[in-house]
Image: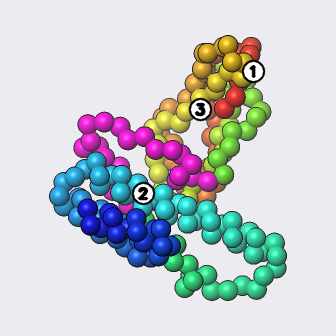
Amino acid sequence: MYFGRMASYFAEARWNTVETTMLKMHARCLKKLNRKDEYVRTVLDLLAKSAASRMALKSASKQASANDASEIHRDWLNDDKVDTTDVFHEIVGYSQQLPYDVTVQMAKYFGDISVEPYVRHYDDKDGFQLRLHFRHLLEDEIEIRAAKIRLVSAISNHTKDVWLEETGTIQLKRGVNRMWIGCNVSVQSPLCV
């Protein structure tokens, strides 16, 4: 408990290196105490912090290059930098022991998420596909078993959602990833992602 409370204190004070160290120690203690749920949530917070740091650094570097600012040594000034190599694979293995699924928002761990508005219809069957585009920010390559997109009706009285899904093993590498996700229905009404 101590490390968890102290980590949040240092987060408020913007002492990022200390906060990260506290989160890592807190996670290590939770793992040794076999408190699986809290351990998984703490490590997910650490991964989210790492991804947010990379998004902010990418945004700042774009602004600096746009302004032709002089190049500075960012590594020693960057106290947001969090090394999370192999942490994702460890947490996936550890979370298999939980009796329930842990759901998290994609936007915490991936950047530049968008669904392209162009529909690709199947030639040989009913249905269509949309292209999902996002930036993978963590150090580890990730293997996923399914990707889904939920479309909701743009008309308020129409309540049926349409789910697009791509199953099978999909390897996500660091950087920009694109994939086609489809469904086998035809829809006549306007939908929103």
Amino acid carrying mark 3 in the image: Ile
Which secondary structure lies at badge 3? strand
Question: How far from the left and from the top, in percent, is residue 184?
Answer: 61, 18
Amino acid carrying mark 2 in the image: Asp
Q: Is residue 108 above or below residue 123?
A: below
* Residue indicated by mark 1: 190
Q: Quadrant of the C terminus?
A: top right
* Residue indicated by mark 2: 45
Question: How far from the left and from the top, in percent, is residue 9?
Answer: 40, 69
Question: How far from the left and from the top, in percent, is residue 129?
Answer: 67, 28
Residue 14 is covered by the magenta coloring:
no
Which secondary structure lies at badge 2? helix
Q: Which residues are magenta?
A: 87-111
Q: Residues within 10 Å of mark 1 (few under 14, many from 20)?
A: few
Q: Is residue 166 above or below residue 109?
A: above
Q: Is residue 114 visible?
A: yes
Q: Which quadrant of the figure has residue 17?
A: bottom left
* Residue indicated by mark 3: 149
Considering only order in the chain, which callout, 2 or 3, is on the residue closer to the N terminus? 2
Considering only order in the chain, which callout, 1 or 3, is on the residue closer to the N terminus? 3
Which secondary structure lies at badge 1? loop
**Disc number placed over residue 2 in the picture, else none:** none
Distance (Cα) linking label 3 and label 1 = 15 Å
Residue 106 is covered by the magenta coloring:
yes
Q: Is residue 91 above or below residue 115?
A: below
